[in-house]
Amino acid sequence: MEERALSESSEDFAAMFEASLKAKRIEKGQTIEGTIVAIGPDVAFVNVGGKGEATIDLGELRDADGKLEAAVGDRIQATVVSTTGGLTLSRRLIRGAATARQLEDAFHTGLPVEGKVEKSVKGGYEVRIAGLRAFCPFSQIDTARTDPSVHEGQVYEFRIIEFKDGGKDLVVSRRVLLEETQRASAAEVRESIVPGAVITGRVASVRDFGAFVDLGGGVQGLLHVSEMGWSRVSDASQVVEPGKEITVKVLRVDDEKKKISLGLKQLSEDPWLRVQTAYKVGEQRTGRVTRVAEFGAFVELEPGIEALAHVSTFPPTGRSREWTALVPPGTTTLFEILSVDVDKKRIGVKMVVDAHEAEDVRAYAERENPVPEERFGSLADKLRGALRPGEK
């Protein structure tokens, strides 16, 4: 009995030793096939034959919507990413692939490969993968057009989209992997984007009307120029810059139209909150004319606080538009506060003009042969000079 037990024990040990030797022959980076034998809460167990049993993260077996694509009995092809404490597989990446055969396997299975962008060439980039030269078109290096020099020398993950002549003719794409990642995370990102949320994004592009901000997962929101500051912003590029990180507040979310409105000024105090106590009717304040309309001039009294000097408050000239010579955009002078309406965010003002200055304007308008329009600016300069303290 003892001899038989020893014999069986020896046979079991020999089998285990042989299996161990076979398992040790598996190297990191090797592509192998196996059958899914069980699915746990976090990983799936894969029978890889004489090579033993391996595990693969369930996240790699789900589609973009999070649905499990694999079942017990399915055969899969994957790459060994670790041999420590057992075999760990991955279908996402072949790091440091060493042979053309591995690259061909990656091409057929869709496994990403790791490559280094050597330099930009005509139409794209030269990428070095496993000692072989591959080509990545400009349109496939990123999801947005960038300066070619940005990618040179970088190590990225690529998917092989063309494999010819035994690996001598390779075409790869990084963009398809980025787009897959964006789709996978877009749903999660959208859940965190709710009105009132303060989030950090990256400026994707700047337009005349505002800027598009990448919030992650390919989700973008619009930061309109009117929401960039409490003061009037005429040029969005003076506030934001493409590629720069920015913290914004979510103002509105339209799920049907998939539109997200963002704000920047909402992260600072609204200057109108202190207008009621800081501005009194009858007091005088220095203001700067920002723009002129048919009905009057808009005057910035401080950043974010704009008032209106109505046309009726300017000295009568007998001509409908002569008053504008006194207040071209950029003019800085004294204005008297006529009214304050905090609820409607309106302040009425009038320019402070003494009787002598008003008479100069009236005299000009009543001349029988007024100066030609091209000389009108000199008169405006003279009158504006009289309005500025310290100027003559």
Image (cartoon, grey):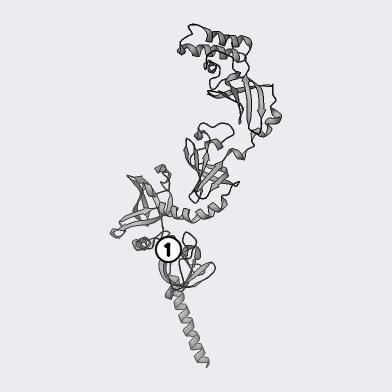
Question: Is 342 rendered above or below residue 11?
Answer: above
Of residue 169 and residue 130, the one placed in the foreground of this image is 169
Asked which quadrant contains residue 101, the reply is bottom left
Residue depicted at 43% across the width and 69% down the height: 26
Q: Position of residue 199 (x, y in %)?
A: 57, 46
**Residue lying at the far top of the rendered structure:** 368
Residue situated furthest bottom in the rendering: 1
Q: Is residue 288 visible?
A: yes
Along the viewing direction, whichever of 361 and 205 lies nearer the viewer: 361
**176 sits to left or right of 314:** left
Which part of the image, by quadrant, shows the C terminus?
top right
Quadrant housing residue 306: top right
Identify which residue is drawn at 51% across, 33% down: 238
Extreme residue toward the right, this view: 277
Residue 49 horizontal side relative to residue 388, left or right:
left
- Residue 328 in the image, given as x and y percentages of width and height: 53, 20
Image x and y of residue 351, in percent:
61, 18
Instruction: Mark yes or no: residue 174 visible.
Output: no
Residue carrying label 1: 29
Q: Amino acid at mark 1?
A: Gly
* Closer to the camera in the image, 40 or 358: 358
- Give the residue at x 39% y 43%: 148
Mark 1: give few (<14), some (14-19) or many (20+) Cα within 10 Å: many
Q: Is residue 112 above or below residue 209?
A: below
Residue 42 location (% of width, % of height): 53, 66
Q: Is residue 350 above or below residue 46?
A: above
Residue 191 vertical placement versus 318 (above, below) = below
Residue 279 image-quadrant placement? top right
